[in-house]
Amino acid sequence: MYTSRLTKKIPAFNLQEMLIVLAIIGILLLIALPNLMPLITKAKSVEAQTQLKAIYNAQNTYRYMYSKFSTDFNELDFEPPKTVNENGTANYKYEIIEATNSAFKARAEAVTDFNGNGVFNVWEIDENGVPKQTVKD
């Protein structure tokens, strides 16, 4: 006759218990996510403000040397970061809209819709050096 060894039972959760816990966590996330979207948008907009300040500083350096602002990032020695669409990490694309001897305007436009409402966040900076949000996401 076959005799089995004594086995010790290890306490564990069964599959049904784990699925119920995951469903509860999912429901809580769905409830909390709309409240967190403005914070996510605000956090991601810090990237735009920081890069626009870098463009502003590069424009001022260029102006001190050549007595005018530039429309070319290469002349400013500024390389825009690769966007998430280009396998990079940036959430914004950057462009210089206009540049004259005494003024310039640069824009950062979001490449993704942070809160899913169809509006893309846009920030601008000019020769005064203060980033302004022109389109709020």
Image (cartoon, helix red, strand yellow):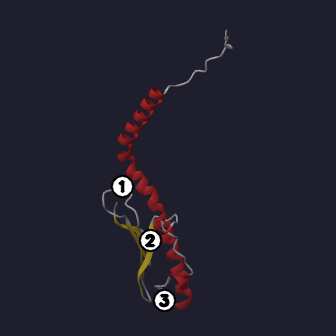
Residue at the extreme left of the image, as rendered:
118
Amino acid type at mark 1 = Asn
Identify the mark nearer the N-term, 2 or 1. Answer: 2
Pick the residue in front: 77 or 25.
25
Pick the residue in front: 74 or 123.
74
Q: Residue at x 57, y 81 (%)?
A: 77
Can you tell which of label 3 and label 2 is closer to the viewer?
A: 2
The location of residue 27, given as percent across then percent down, is 37, 37
Identify the mark at residue 68; answer none if there is no mark. Answer: 3
Q: Which residue is mark 1?
A: 115
Distance between the Cα atoms at labels 3 and 2? 24 Å
Up-down: is 43 above or below 28? below
Amino acid type at mark 2 = Lys
Q: Which residue is mark 2?
A: 93
Up-down: is 58 above or below 67? above
Identify the mark nearer the N-term, 3 or 1. Answer: 3
In the picture, the quarter occupied by the C terminus is: bottom left
The location of residue 29, given as percent across then percent down, is 40, 41
Identify the mark at residue 131; answer none if there is no mark. Answer: none
Q: Are marks 3 and 1 in contact (CB under 8 Å)?
A: no
Density class for disc 1 (Cα within 10 Å; few <14, some 14-19, many ≥20) is some
Can you tell which quarter of the image residue 2 is in?
A: top right
Q: Residue at x 54, y 91 (%)?
A: 66
Density class for disc 2 (Cα within 10 Å; few <14, some 14-19, many ≥20) is some
